Amino acid sequence: MNLDAKNIGAYLLDLSEGRCTVEQRDEILKYLRENPKMGLSAQEQLPSLSEDFFPRYPAKTGIYAQELSRAEEQEEDVAIGW
Amino acid sequence: MVAAEYNQCVDAYSDRLYRFVLKVGASRQVANELVKNCFTSLWQQKENIGTKEVRIFLFSAAFHALHKLAKTDPDKLRPEEEVIYASQGIQRTLSEGLYTLHPVHRALLVLRDYEGSSYGELALISGLEETKVKSEIYIARKKLKRILIQSQLKA
């Protein structure tokens, strides 16, 4: 693991979501101790969005195979001048 | 993929793709058009795409279309009020905060939190490296947290 300012966020996310080995966790904690000015924490709780919105696609009938196939046929007819 | 399989994909993904596009901030009109374009593209390439690849294909097409829109015509990425205010309490603050973030951050968060996409899938959808995806999501969540704290301090 080569920790730096660009990738530390990714490893903190791995740590908080339980994807780090003990060795990796120790390395992250060491990096945070050595770089206190970054103001990052290994135990920080970060918010997530919860599903609150369930719209229905209003033009669904227009994207079924039959409709798209019909549209393709019409384009071909125009292209050959029928 | 044959026509019947394609139609099953319409049933499985059109509402979810539409929600993703609206949640990132497109108006209903733009979202309608964008979703149609993604499915038209899938239909045209159906012989080269297996049913297991469809989800990544559709969300990737929408992700890149939204990214292009953010660069060329950012005014079209102003969310509708009912999309912002669909929730209450902390989630409403987070929903409002979402639209202060860069559209790429919005898209990654919505895909992760709404669609349950893995980081590997997010890398495929966005074209970013997986570590970069995680870093960007970490930054986005930190920004949302800051917004949440500020709103709680104001209250």
Image: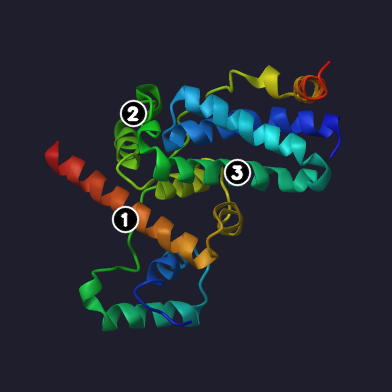
Q: Are marks 2 and 3 on the same chain?
A: yes
Instruction: Give the number of the disc on residue B88.
Output: 2
Q: Position of residue B110 (x, y in %)?
A: 47, 43
Tag of residue B61: 3
Q: Nearer the viewer, mark 1 or mark 2?
A: 1
Work out how far the residue at label 1 is from the one at label 2, CA to CA, in angstroms.
Answer: 21 Å
Looking at the image, residue B32 sits to the left or right of residue B145; the answer is: right
Q: Which residue does the numbered mark 1 point to in the structure image?
A: B142
Q: Distance between the residues labelled 2 and 3?
A: 31 Å
Front-lying residue, B141 or A41: B141
Q: Distance between the residues labelled 3 and 1?
A: 27 Å
Q: Is mark 3 on a helix, strand or loop?
A: helix
Kind of residue at disc 2:
Gln
Question: What is the quadrant of the C terminus of chain A in the image?
Answer: top right
Q: How many numbered callouts?
A: 3
Q: Which chain contains the residue that carries disc 2?
A: B
Chain of the residue under label 3: B
| Residue at the (35%, 23%) spot, across then down | B81
Tell which circle, 3 or 1, labels the residue nearer the N-terminal end: 3
Q: Is mark 2 on a helix, strand or loop?
A: loop
- Name the amino acid type tagged 3: Ala
Other-residue count near label 3 (Cα within 10 Å), few / some / many at <14 / 14–19 / ≥20: many
Query: Amino acid under label 1?
Result: Lys
Determine whether A36 is above or below B120 in the image: below
Of the residues under marks 1 and 2, which one precedes in the sequence? 2
Dividing the picture into quarters, in which one does residue B120 lie? bottom right
Asked whether B48 or B119 is in front, the reply is: B48
